[in-house]
Amino acid sequence: MNTLPTIPADRLPALLRAMPKAELHMHIEGSLEPELIFALARRNGVAIPYASVDELRRAYAFTNLQSFLDIYYAGASVLLKEQDFYDMAWAYLLRAQADNVLHTEMFFDPQTHTARGVAMDTVVNGLHRACVDAREKLGVSASLILCFLRHLSEEDAFATLEQALPLRDKFIGVGLDSSEVGHPPEKFARVFARCRALGLHLVAHAGEEGPPEYVWTALDVLKVERVDHGVQSSKDPALMRRLAQDRIPLTVCPLSNLKLCVFPSLAQHNLGALLDAGLMATVNSDDPAYFGGYVNENFTQTFAATGLTARHAYMLARNSFEASFVDAGTRRGFVDRLDACLASFA
Ligand code: HPA
Ligand code: ZN
């Protein structure tokens, strides 16, 4: 779209909700709502240290990434059977459809499950079946990205990759998540090199709480195609120039950053500054069941707090398709649908 139609400011929240978008940074285990945690705990006979859904929800008061991860891994302990993984992913995919997500690339953390004795097949087959059904029954395109837990060793990541390779056609790439500070990207240089040789897409969390140096090494050592979060990059002008020049996508998660105290308020979030510096930023939900909202809530709350405009909305939605790992024809179809939506709001 060459010239953006004029869209009245009072129509902006409706546009944010209606516009077709891709979601590129969400952890499927972070979509487990408290109600589903309790239902699966009952179904599987797993004890959880909370008396009720309300008590569990009240525990979602985080001070930093680690305080969240402790509860997030505890919540995932109710997942045992293939159907549990299917049900979790299906619930998210229904919400994604409601938010006009045309395409989603979902992270999963196999080590969280295999360490408890759940087989890799159980995890991947359950999630993948939900992706197949989403395309057929919801018209939502969905794929999977396997994340290595960075607080564990590179040797453990290699073992996880070996377990997953028989299922190679069911995931499109690998990522790096969990506790960032003290676990720099270069700790995983060899396993990422192996994944690259295998033709897998590469992404990594960097610059969420960690310093800009971690974004540099994610790019230069791991050779990632996208940076997850990356918001600390604004502290390093040379890094900002690099990200803009190479059109490296950042998958930004505003409500996550707010809930994990990365920014003191949404009004002080740097999403607008990243876009205005020419970076290819996108908006995503990260762990929507824990951080107070799915992707449309991230859009509407952030725009309300920061005064971003319809032009920014279009850039963010367009970036989400440009940054996705779909083929060129599919991407063109998505952007055409976005442009048609914008035109209908003029
Ligand atoms: N950062 C790191 N690891 C994670 C996150 C996150 O935001 N969410 C789930 N695992
Ligand atoms: Zn994340």
Image (cartoon, helix red, strand yellow):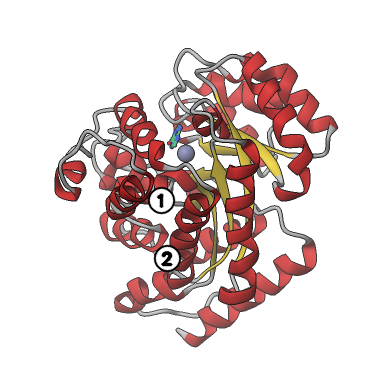
Q: Is residue 185 left or right of residue 193?
A: left
Q: Is residue 2 left or right of residue 262?
A: right
Q: Position of residue 61 (x, y in %)?
A: 20, 36
The amino acid pointed to by label 2 is Arg
The amino acid pointed to by label 1 is Ser
The CA span between labels 1 and 2 is: 10 Å
Secondary structure category for the residue under label 1: helix
| Quarter of image, res 152 | top right
Residue of label 1: 31
- Mark 2 is surrounded, within 10 Å at the Cα level, by few (under 14), some (14 to 19) or many (20 or more) other residues, namely some
In the rendered image, is residue 327 in sight?
yes
Q: Residue at x 66, y 27 (%)?
A: 160
Which label number is shown at residue 117?
A: none
33 up-or-down from 197: above or below: below
Ranked by sequence position, the earlier of labels 1 and 2 is 1
- Mark 1 is surrounded, within 10 Å at the Cα level, by few (under 14), some (14 to 19) or many (20 or more) other residues, namely many
92 up-or-down from 218: above or below: below
Q: Quadrant of the N terminus?
A: bottom right
Residue of label 2: 95
In the rendered image, is residue 223 in sight?
no
